[in-house]
Structures are given as structure tokens and as C-alpha cells.
Amino acid sequence: MTEEYTRPIPIPDAASAAYWEGAKRHELTIKHCNDCGYYIHYPKTRCPNCWSTNVGDAVVSGRGTIYTLTIHHVPSAPGFETPYPVALVSLEEQEDVRILANIVECPLEDIKVGMPVEVVFKDATPEISIPVFRPRKG
Amino acid sequence: MKLDQGKDNACIVGVGRSIISRDSGKTALDLVTDACTNAIRHAGLTRDDIDGIATNQMSGVNGYQINEAMRFPTVNWYGQMEMPQVTAAWSVMEAAMAVEYGASDYCLVVMGLMKPKGAGSRRDPFAGSVGPPQVGGDAQWVAPYGGNGFTFNHFMSRYMYEFNAPRETFGHIAITDRKHAMMNERAIVRTPLTMDDYMSARWISEPFCLYDCDFPVDGYAAVVITKPDRARSLPNKPVQIVAASQNTGPRTDMFQWDDMTNMGSKYAAKKLWELVPGTTLKDIDVVMCYDGFSVITVMWIEAFGFCGVGEAKDFLKGDMMQLGGSGIPMNTHGGMLSEGRVHGMGYIAEATDQLMGLCGERQVANAKRALIGQGGSVQNADMLLQVMD
Ligand SMILES: [Zn+2]
């Protein structure tokens, strides 16, 4: 954390606590059904695919692909300088797990839908780190 | 709902509007009562006839407030859908069911918008907050990234990627609507719009430019709905709600929709055509496709089957959706992109006016059937209106 963090900060709840605890360790952690293997996002403790409650938390690769890309020219929250990118990233483990995130370490004009990306974490507070994505290296 | 085609279905018998403006200087409730009074009088009815009120959470007022302002002697049924993002079609369908069930004899449906003003509006949702805002619930996945809870630009991004669709595809929607708005004195913007204007407009949230986004206004519209036997004795040509449907697919979070090259309109259109076997686009005289954002309109056009999925980029180059063109005119009032965001009731009011023959310069000759698609992303509704024989 270099300077004062002014962007919105998530409040973890019973279902999302493991996600944000994982993020604090810089691990992308997704609810995962132990019965059918489905990854569940947003986090829920009953699998929407097979309705099993045998659901755990899995650390995933953090690799994904940009599914959609928007570039905001009107700020929707404090702490953002326009223009800034907001993308949906599809995870490698399961295409329909989509994580909304900013794309970092890349000039705006080079960010494209379909681009392979990987997760990095931005430390917001001592308790909260925010997963974002950058172009995949290698 | 399954309806007999045109036999016992509820009818729209009157239409009314408030003024539509950028800043009316009135309250939402005052505008609502303007629209309701006009609709009731247009239907040839009085205070004593109305016994049902439907609106929904998007309108900013509720049925009790409307009744306190209008003092109907007895209200036997209220419809007040609380689901997020539902527009007028949901409430019209609810009212039609209430009338057909007998819960209400003459039901008022009103919808519209008070343009958000000042702190806390969508443009500046965190204005006035001190320190970093703390966000829970679904916002924890969106707000930390400066996302604004609206996904329509994400749908447009994916659509453009999958189908190699140029921005002009969406420009055609804005231009068609504007062309029609120039014939509608109520429309909030009536200046000509060219493709050059569209392509050079400022960005809002790429791929959205200014002209992909509708105009927030202060404005309301209302209709009165009753059964066919009652409708026949009233002054206007009854406009029957032949079929209506409201639908989602398996995913109902806007950011987690499975395939962002389409929207819930895919499900809504499929259901509507199932409800009216034998009816095709050839039977339709005028169409209303929701245009809160231009991408929604493109997806309705493809969902209804005007062209194949991904083909709008070529289909819209022609005049197929334009008044005086070779196809079925769309959004003859200018849609929400040009008339203003009356939260869907603008289309129902315009379609009814077209079928009653009240549209003057922009009247579609001999219009008998209107197709209406409303809503975008996960939740959509549609209906088929028909002049009663
Ligand atoms: Zn499962």
C-alpha cells in the first residue's frame, strides 16, 4: 500500500469470507462443489448446479481470458481516474466463472477481448486485497 | 400467460401522458396524476370506474400514493412488482391478468421516470461519502473496480467481438429512433443525427458513446385496461393484449449471464411466438424494441427474428426498421434514445396510439398489430397488441 486507498472496499459476508481471505494471501479462491466439480461464483454454499451442500473452497490458477471489455470515461466510484478499464474475466478452470476486474500493467489501447490474463493482487487495506488482472506472461 | 388469441383478453382503452421534460419542476406524484387523469379521460371513464392500480418499483411512486392523490372510491387490486429493472410491460401484463381474473374492472397502469438529480444519482453514487465506501452484497464484486452495476456495455463488447460487428450497427438504432423522434413533438431530442455525429460522439463507457444511452427525463405515461365486453362500449377502438410474456434464462445476475451475445429477449421472443401459433412477423405492422441502450434493441431485433443472430450489422444498413421503409417500422415515437426514458410505457403508449390511428405524421397506415419487446440483460418481457375486431 503506497498511498491512501480511496476506492470502494468490499465487506465480506458468510459466503464470500473465504474469497477475501484468499485474496489477502494473494490466492484466488473460488467455491467449488465436491460432488459435481462445479465452480460457484458469486460464492454460495449450496451448489446451483447439483444443489449439493458439499461445497469447499478451491485455490484456482488465476489464469483467464478477457470475456468483455469496457472503458469507463465517467467515474462510477472514488479513486478512479478516467479513462479506466473494467473487464469480465473468464477463468481457465470454468468458462462461466466471470470475475469483474480492472486490467493493469497494460496500455489501454492494447487491452483486447480474448486476451489471456493472470491475476495479481492490489493491497487496499491490511485486511483487504483486491484481485485484478494483467496480460499473461509466457 | 396463455391467452386465446383475441377472444377474452384484456384491452387497452385509453392512453395518457404527462409532459416529458428534462426538469419538470414537479414531483413524481404530480406527473403520475397528470398521466393517469389524461388516460382515464381519454378512455371515456371517470373516477368512479377505476378500481385497480398497477405500477412498479422503477416508477418511484406506489399505488397507495397514487390513490391518495386521486381518491378512487374503492381500489380492489394493486399491482406493485418489486423486482429490479422491470419496466412497463411487466405491470401491463399483471394488470391484464387481474382484469381477466375479475379482480379489477378498470385498471390503471402507470410508469415513468423522475430523472435522478444531485448526490446519490447514478452518475455519482458515492457523492458525499467520507473515506473509502464500504460495499457489501453483490456490490462487493463490482464497486471495488469502479463498475457501475450496468452491464449493457459488456453485452455490446461481447457481441462486437463474436460477430465482428462494427459500431455502426448500433449507430443505425440511434439514427432510426432520431429520425422518428423528429416527427414526435413530445420527444426530448428532435435534431437530426447522422452516422458521423454518432461515430464522433464522446464516450460514456466504451463501447457506449453518448448516443447509445437513452435520455433520462421527468415523464410518465398511463393506460387503462378492461375486459373486451366493457371495452366495446367505450369511445376508442379497443387494443387487445393478445399475448404477453415475461422471462429470464437460468442466470439472473447481469454480470454472470452465460452468453453475452444475447439477452433474456431470446427467451421472451421464443415464448411469445409459442403463445400465438401461426402468427409471424408478416402479421406485424409496427414494432417497439426497448432502447435504454442501443445494444438492447439490436438483441431484440435478432430475438424476434427480423434477422439472424449476429446479422444486424448488415440488416440495419437498409431501411427495414424505418417509417416509410421496406420493412416494419420500429420505435415510431423515437424510443427512449430520443423521446426520453419513460421506463417502457412510452412504447406501449405509442403502440396503442398507432393501433388507434392517433399518430398523425408518423402514423403507420392501417396498423392492426404491434409487437413490443421490453427490458434488457437478464429480464425481458414482450407483448402482442391487436386492434379488436
Ligand atoms: Zn454440484
Image (spheres, rainbow, N blue to C red):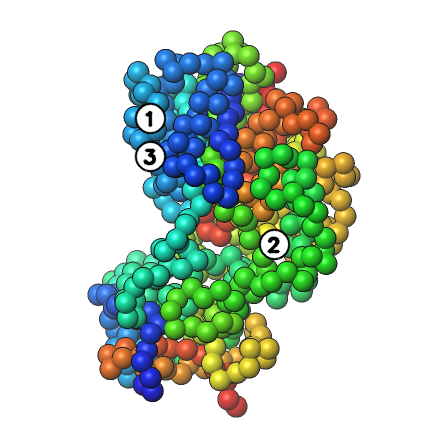
Report how far apart the C-alphas of labels 3 and 2 lie in the structure: 31 Å
Q: Are marks 3 and 1 on the same chain?
A: yes
Q: Residues within 10 Å of mark 3 (few under 14, many from 20)?
A: many
Return the mark for residue B115: none
**Residue at label 3?**
B62
Disc 2 marks a residue whose amino acid type is: Tyr
**Residue at label 1?**
B69
Element on which disc 2 rests: helix
Q: Position of residue B42 (x, y in %)?
A: 51, 19
Residue with the most extreme bottom position: A138
**Residue at label 2?**
B211
Report how far apart the C-alphas of labels 3 and 1 lie in the structure: 11 Å
Residue with the most extreme front position: B25
Disc 1 marks a residue whose amino acid type is: Ala
Circles 1 and 2, Cβ within 8 Å, touching? The answer is no
In the picture, measured across the screen, residue A78 lies left or right of residue B383, that is: left
Element on which disc 3 rests: loop
Disc 3 marks a residue whose amino acid type is: Asn
Q: Residues within 10 Å of mark 2 (few under 14, many from 20)?
A: many
Residue at the image point whose x is 35% and y is 72% from the top: A7
Q: Are marks 3 and 2 on the same chain?
A: yes
